[in-house]
Amino acid sequence: MQDAVDGREGILFPESAWRDYPSGSSLRRPAAAWNHPPMATHLLEAMSREGFEEVIALQDRRSGLRAFLAIHDSTQGPAFGGLRRWSYLDEDQALRDCLRLARSMTYKCALAGLQAGGAKLVILDRPELDPAAGYRAIGRLVERLGGRFYTGPDVGTDAQELGWVAEETRFVTRPDEQGPGLLPESTCAGVFAGIAACLRHLDGEEDWRRRTVVVQGLGAVGRGLARLLIEAGARVRASELDPEKAERVARELELELCDPATEYEQPCDVFAPCALGGILHDLTLTRLHCRIVAGGANNVLVRSLHGERLHQRGVLYAPDFAINSGALIRGALFHLEGRRERVEQIGARIGEVLGRILGRSRAEGLAPVRVAVDEAAQRIAHWRGERVPEA
């Protein structure tokens, strides 16, 4: 199932095509950057090979908005995907990020058993953008799709921005009492339960007081996860690129801070990436001194083969699209069924999914990421009436 993650014959995400992944700092970016042809050259072929339904390029002259919407799958029900605003290097990088995140959302829906598919909306953040007008333009686009796509929070898009979107569309996860609420808390509960499942898989018990966890990133998810871990009795170290935020959260939670430049080398039981993605590649994975990698970030691996290499090195990698789907579950069930799933139930649900993946991984001698991709691909193929080879 390598092709299902990286693109068959190097069309979608070939190693020769990776530039710096948008991770917020050179400390957390892939070390190498290669020349590659424009994404548009292969877009339709990539969409066909990877099963995308639609890609929309949005340019709004009045607001300065430039954005991409990728709908990967709406076979089972509406496609869900957050609205990311980021300072991409160029349109090519933005489109690649959009496609990869959209497909990951479909995998999340498949593994979580949701009657929904995946999509993603990315905005190219640039000086010419009028945020309020741009987000309203996004809202009009979402409304025109008539419920085929629901959007919500992501990096660069919080309550204020979602409020602007909500002025123009019904199909958005509202930040007020009319929305599902507790989205970061749902993600934290799932990641915490997933880490617990990993510990039980390796040691037969959690025994939090013997555990050291390094949390990378102290945003809403990283901070919430650190709190849960500390309350359970674990020792937590954390890294954060924003010094003021780091000090504030460290005082609030009474946790240890480590230098982001040495975060990978920290000896620990669990390394929990909770910032942006694309952080594990040939250079960083050799620096890890942990037994488990499990966190809330999306697309942690630069390529799926890095999940295989972690497995070969004896490091248990919890696939991100299996462990960090808590907010998706909470939001999708709210929109699809009109109910707010309890955070504790979401955590239990994700822990069960991950436990099943790890059990099959052990039984078949396969890397967990390979098992997770295979299970997701099989379910998606069933939706579409297709057949795919097993891992």
Image (cartoon, rainbow, N blue to C red):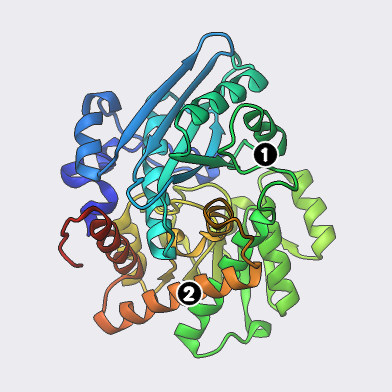
Residue drawn at point x = 40 percent, y = 54 percent:
301
- Residue 103: x and y in percent read 36, 47
> In terms of depth relative to the viewer, which is nearer, 158 or 200?
158
Answer with the quarter of the image where residue 382 lies.
bottom left
Answer with the quarter of the image where residue 171 lies.
top right
Q: Is residue 40 visible?
A: yes
Describe the element under mark 1 as helix, strand or loop: loop
Asked if 271 appears above or below 297 in the picture, the reply is below
N-terminal-most mark, 1 or 2? 1
Asked if 173 appears above or below 106 in the picture, the reply is above
Residue drawn at point x = 45 percent, y = 53 percent:
300
> In terms of depth relative to the viewer, which is nearer, 337 or 35?
337
- Residue 131: x and y in percent read 64, 22
**Other-residue count near label 2 (Cα within 10 Å), few / some / many at <14 / 14–19 / ≥20:** many
Q: Which residue is mark 2?
A: 291
Residue drawn at point x = 80 percent, y = 52 percent:
247
Q: Amino acid at mark 2?
A: Arg
Q: Which residue is mark 1?
A: 158
Q: How many marks?
A: 2
Describe the element under mark 2 as helix, strand or loop: loop
Q: Is residue 218 visible?
A: no
- Residue 346: x and y in percent read 58, 68
Residue drawn at point x = 24 percent, y = 53 percent:
384
